[in-house]
Amino acid sequence: MIEQIQAKSILNPTGGFLATYTHSLNAYQGCAFGKGSCPYCYVRAMPIQKFSGKPWGEWVKAKINAPGLLKQELEAARRKGTFGSLRIFMSTATDPYQGAEAKLKITRAVLEIFSLSGEFGFLVVQTRSPLIERDIELLKQLGSRVAVSFTIETNRDEVRRQITPTSPSIERRLATLERMTRAGLKTQAAISPVLPCDPVVFADLIAVRARRAVVDTLIDGDGAGGRRSAELGMPQLLRSLGYEDWLRRDVHEPLLEALRQRMGAESVGFSQEGFNLL
């Protein structure tokens, strides 16, 4: 279900987990990747979902006035003298490339505003959707002012089908990541959270397709020390699938080490620190 709404603002001050960013930008609310998508998503535990009245994955609200608001707010930042120091993360509580984006093109219009705005600070586009390929040429226009952080949690598609069955296939996401990097964009593989995988194989796949990588876990990356992941039933889900070993606190370390060996320590980060190094 897609609902078009008018937002009151589009650049929201951020901090905490994303401490080095000044603002978040969410052109959509909710998620429409399908029922059962991303059971670990921390937004499921937030009031916006609890009071939505609809299952997560089956609703999305599109902020159709986002481009106009962005233009106004960037102009306000320019007047205040903060324009050049803006560091914006898009998006923190939704995916900017929802299925509705193919038709509504709100994220594309937002990128066009950024491309025409001048030398603002920095923009991170966080997504798991191959739809971002549509905007490669537009992203290239932003040059060093933009980075694409692309989520891919495992190299094993059977794990993807078990845990995030409505998300794009591993093969498709690897292809998108490679295309973005070959286009000259600054790319990051966001292994967030790391799901059951083959660390060495996974590291080999990522190292030749991304410029950097960040590894996160259900404990370190849910914003509540693992409490939200527990509330969302992730321990029970992993146990039911025979992945109990992947609940260990150190489960990420083999992958992190394999990536650092292949990409260099300076190109691989962990959890909060890793995301803030972009």
Image (cartoon, rainbow, N blue to C red):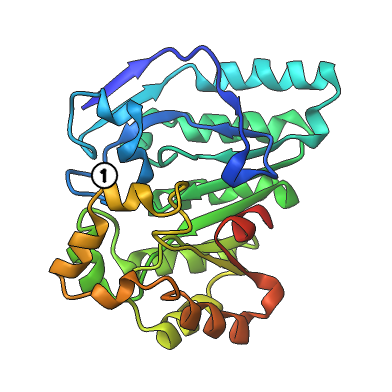
Looking at this view, is 84 or 178 the one in front?
84
Q: Is residue 152 left or right of residue 9?
A: left
Residue drawn at x 41%, y 75% as measured from the top left? 251
- Residue neighbourhood size for the residue with mark 1, other residues' Cα within 10 Å, grouped as few (<14), some (14–19), many (≥20): many
Picture residue at 39% right of the left edge, 59% below the top = 218
Looking at the image, which residue is at 41% across and 42% down? Answer: 95
- Whether residue 40 is visible: no
Q: Would you identify the image quadrant in which residue 210 lies? A: bottom right
Residue at left 27%, top 55%? Answer: 167
220 in relation to 210, above or below? above
The residue furthest right is 81
Q: What is the x, y in percent for residue 50?
A: 26, 29
Total numbered badges shown on the rendered structure = 1
Q: Could you say whether the residue bearing mark 1 is in a helix, strand or loop?
A: loop
Q: Position of residue 224 (x, y in %)?
A: 45, 47
Q: Is residue 169 above or below residue 99?
A: below
Side (left or right) of 132 relative to 157? right
Q: Observer-nearest residue: 9 or 109?
A: 9
Residue 161 position (above or below residue 124): below
Q: Quadrant of the C terminus?
A: bottom right
Mark 1 belongs to which amino acid?
Phe
Horizontal and vertical percent for residue 213? 57, 68
* Residue for badge 1: 33
Q: For the N terminus, give its image quadrant.
A: top left
